[in-house]
Image (spheres, grey):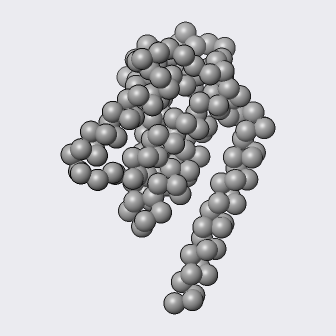
Amino acid sequence: MDIVSHGLWGGIVAGKKNRRTYWTAFLIGILPDFFSFGIFFLATIFRITPDIAWHAGPDNLEIVPEYVTHLYNITHSLVVFVVVFLLVFMIRRKPFVPLLAWGLHIIMDIPTHSSAFFPTPFLWPVSNFRIDGVSWVHPYIFFPNLILLVSVYLFYFGYWRIRRSRR
């Protein structure tokens, strides 16, 4: 799934309480990709890394630095997510709902990443099992995702407009 969709889904699913929780969930929804690929692209922009990030893809995975794969394993693991979620729960003594956007990100990535380019390591470090899904750029995934996002947001904002007008 693309990074913007992750943010939008995370915001609408885990951040409906108010604007602050929405934007918190939105940001948490994009963090797994940002902490792996975003750092790589920023390093390229600021010339810390050679200008190769723009050419990374399924046909040339060898140019992606090893740290990107390691960070991707950490940020896309349901095992790591559950541990962090439980630690935060124990510290706060209540669930931090916007953090669920991270778990949603991983769950959405499992079927929308093919084995050709960064399949989701959702059981890492317990297992290296990965599912060969359909890439999110495929029209069968991309357009339904877009239509669902627009529909959900139109419904959500329409619902709140109707609810506010009845007050």
Rendered location of residue 14, percent (x, y):
47, 54
Rendered location of residue 23, percent (x, y):
43, 57
Rendered location of residue 80, percent (x, y):
38, 29
Rendered location of residue 141, percent (x, y):
73, 38
Q: Residue at x 70, y 50 (%)?
A: 146
Pick the residue in front: 107 or 147.
107
Q: Residue at x 64, y 31 (%)?
A: 111
Relative side of 53 to 31, left or right:
right
**Residue 55 visible here:** no
Pick the residue in front: 22 or 122.
122
Relative side of 65 to 115, left or right:
left
Q: Residue furthest right?
A: 140
Relative side of 165 to 40, left or right:
right
Relative side of 42 to 59, left or right:
left
Q: Residue at x 61, y 81 (%)?
A: 162
Q: Compared with residue 112, is residue 20 higher up or lower down, i.e. above or below? A: below
Q: Quadrant of the N terminus?
A: top right
- Label count reads 0
**Residue 2 visible here:** yes
Q: Residue at x 38, y 62 (%)?
A: 20
Q: Residue furthest left?
A: 91
